[in-house]
Image (cartoon, helix red, strand yellow):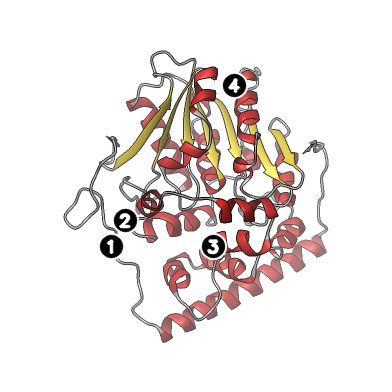
Amino acid sequence: MVRSVPANENHIPSAVARRSVASAWKSYAIAATLGVLLSWAYLSGVKAPPPRICGQPNGPPVTAPRIVLSDGRKLAYSERGVPKEQAKHKLIVVHGLEGSRHQSLSLVSQELLEELSVYMVSYDRAGYGQSDPNPTRTVKSEAFDVEELADQLELGPKFYLASISIGGYTAWSCLYYIPHRLAGVLMFSPVTNFWWSKLPSREAYNAFHTQAIGDKLALLVAHYTPSFLYFWMTQKLLPTSSTMGALHLHCNPMDRDTILGGKPDPAIAEEAMQQGIFESKIRDKMVMFGNWEFDPSEVPDPFPSKNGSVHIWQGDEDCLVPVALQRAVHRSLPWIQYHELAGVGHLLHAAPGVTEKAFRQLFQSS
């Protein structure tokens, strides 16, 4: 069941509440910083190894087509759907944490792409799969990687964008920096940043406390002391980010069944982070939970003439992306079409019929 959320609901915490929340955040930050520094002193010298860059000596081989970006980096991609020249719609898919360009293979069927006349291209984000790392990656740089991909593949003046989970920060980046290039946007369970400045403080604070202890510690390190995140994610003394473990052990039964019942190709799973975890999933967390150049609530409606649409699909039992924060984002951006699914967790794109319905709505409302 899809829950309709009124856009005009709002909650403005009192000054006292804001002070108490700020004090609590500060206490967590101090505790996390001291813990990391003490651990670092105990295990001095631990740092991320250099990435194994594809196509270079001692690096993995290059087997995928790649474009060369303006800064010299190479971006790997794969294509599906109808031929680009015949397609009515051109779509770029942005994968999630620990994913790759192959993630789109399970997102939507070839039959539906043909029915809707969609050309779909998915790519390895920087540091994943066969795309070169970007040690200066930011929220902003993600949008221009997408734009260069679209231009070099000659997708035309406008294209559609779909994102999964943490790939949502790429979608927000595109909405903010290159809205004129977008024909429509679809986000599945986009990850939220507890430190977005416009989120109601009390809601952000309460949502933070729904996270597992290891996730809370990793989030604090990612935000306040990101240079220590590689050490934190690889140390064994204290709990760290659980991600898929949390889905398996603590969350929605559908998520658990999807993880336990899935049979991913081991070669595809290995390729996703074959260049090293630092320039892939760890830098993802550093960017996602760092200080953004903008707040999503500041994003203007990219389609004031109603010639396109933006959709967020969110499960109300998502233990990684608190539904309360997604609702807060929607309240501040009522032009977003928000679809909340009852009884569904984080992996809603794997729920039967959801992606088909989402893609039909995206293309039919644009």
Q: CA distance from mark 2 to mark 3?
A: 24 Å
Q: Amino acid at mark 2?
A: Gln
Q: Is residue 151 left or right of residue 104?
A: left
Q: Which mark is residue 363?
A: 4
Element under label 4? helix
First in sequence: mark 2 or mark 4? 2
What residue did someone put label 3 on? Answer: 223
Q: CA distance from mark 1 to mark 3?
A: 22 Å
Of residues 50 and 91, the one nearer the viewer is 91
What residue did someone put label 1 on? Answer: 50
What residue did someone put label 2 on? Answer: 275
Mark 4 or 1, closer to the camera: 4
Q: Amino acid at mark 4?
A: Phe
Residue 280 in percent (x, y) is at 40, 54
Residue 18 in percent (x, y) is at 76, 61
Q: Is residue 136 left or right of residue 326?
A: left
Q: Are marks 2 and 4 in contact (CB under 8 Å)?
A: no
Residue 16 in percent (x, y) is at 82, 64
Mark 2 or 1, closer to the camera: 2
Q: Which mark is residue 295?
A: none
Q: Amino acid at mark 1?
A: Pro
Q: Residues within 10 Å of mark 1 (few under 14, many from 20)?
A: few
